[in-house]
Image (spheres, rainbow, N blue to C red):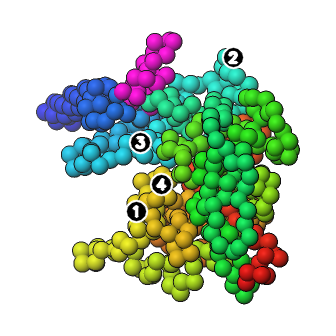
Amino acid sequence: MTILKKYKFLLFILTAFLFAFVFTASLKGIDKYTSNDQYCISCHVHAHADNSWRQASHYNNKSGVVVHCVDCHLPPKDHMNYWPEKIKAASKDLYSFYFTDHSKIDWEEKSMVKHAKNHTYNESCINCHDNLFPLHLSKKGDKAHLYYKNNQDKLNCINCHLDVGHGGKKMHKPNIAFLQKDKITEVFKEATNISNFEDFTEQIPGTDVSFEMVAIPKTDTIAPFFMGKIEVSWNEYKTFLEETESEGRIIENTEDVDAISGATPPFGDPSQGWGMDTRPAITMTWHAANTYCKWLSQKTRKAYRLPTKEEWIHACKANSTEDFFFGGKVKDYKKSKFPMNLFRSPDEKINEYVIWSENGNERTALPDQVKPNPFGLINMLGNVKEFCSDEININGTKEHVIMGGSFNSKIEDLLYHKVDHTQHEAWMITDPQIPKSIWWYSDCTDVGFRVVCEFPKKQSKSNE
């Protein structure tokens, strides 16, 4: 190699080295500039980016150590996915900042676990908390972390620790206050007497709570029965919890519940902060719903239970001959793909009767937001899926039938004959208790139930 060639080669090496040095320095500078909290908050212009962060334990804690945005929302810097994830996050954030109407974004919805776990990384959590079993950890915490260690492929840290980054629900603290009895001034002394096969309003003795029951006519194979006009509401379900729960207080009048024991306190807010009152009660297990029916039967001296699948379909269908009781077929309410969506919009009639994925905002709704079906039943489709009494075998595991779809459901899952089922183990994955609760699901927020009341056979014959 000639001296000139050696000189050119050396110059090339030095130039390449200098370029790499400048590029690396620039990259570090860019990384540092775009990784500070204020830069992140300037893009995420909503309260959860700043206010709730300052209230959470990752910012406001005894140690005084502040956990910054990138510490949770990106993998550790030495992780191979740091830069790919940073570029992906930056692209999404910039697009949202410039092209999305922030006033139409539901930040409460975006802060739910199902969304939040897509923006946090277990690797980052473990990077700071490399010892999952510190000395100060409680026995329950120790068991919960052991469960996590054995199921890391199924779990995200954020499933149980949603509150640490931006404040919110305490996932590991039993919500005893939720089960404390509400003050009432007047109570019903007795349940409603029924003598004819017609709609009636049930009164729960010893409470101020009542609910409407609708008379559902017989078919050739199904006897006439009554069904709840709406899904069992928090107003109704809380009377059961207040009277029968045993953890956190002493039950004085056990004869009123006839030895039926109720649910232990849930972890966090079982209503997910969406409100209670006449919204459907959710997150209870099939066992809890079935126990409620037994309790209600004893309180009212009637035969209350969960509907069978056939009863539920008959009540929902309401003698309709089309795909939906409000008319039409699946294709009428389904969005068309481009370019057909430029010429045809889906029929919005469904929104008058159903709370589903297109109008549900990922939460339960009050019953007055939709119209009833021809039998007078509200939210038979959508809002929350509903337990039935039928068992179903899924890969050797006993589950229970659920019907009707929910606020999360697509149009195909709202057909009245669409049979779904519980996923008991999957819906308990983040329950921190060992053994897990038989009363509350930790990972299912869109299943509830409505009750059926049997019409006495003697009266049934005289009223047919």
Q: Earlier in the sequence, mark 1 or mark 3?
A: 3
- Alpha carbon of mark 4 to alpha carbon of mark 2: how far? 44 Å
Disc 4 to disc 3: CB gap under 8 Å: no
Q: Earlier in the sequence, mark 2 or mark 3?
A: 3
Which numbered mark, 1 or 4, is in the foreground of this view?
4
Say what amino acid the circle numbered 2 marks: Leu
Nearer the observer, 54 or 26:
54
Measured as percent of width and height from the top left, residue 18 is found at 21, 28
The residue where tag 2 is placed is 135
Measured as percent of width and height from the top left, residue 143 is found at 73, 31
Nearer the observer, 342 or 324:
324
Q: Is residue 195 magenta?
A: no
Which numbered mark, 1 or 2, is in the foreground of this view?
1
The relative height of residue 317 versus residue 189 in the rendered view (above or below) is: below
- Alpha carbon of mark 1 to alpha carbon of mark 2: how far? 48 Å
Q: Is residue 58 magenta?
A: yes
Which numbered mark, 4 or 3, is in the foreground of this view?
4
Q: Earlier in the sequence, mark 1 or mark 2?
A: 2
The structure residue drawn at horizontal position 69% and vertical position 16%, both measured from the top left corner, is 135
The structure residue drawn at horizontal position 59% and vertical position 48%, both measured from the top left corner, is 234
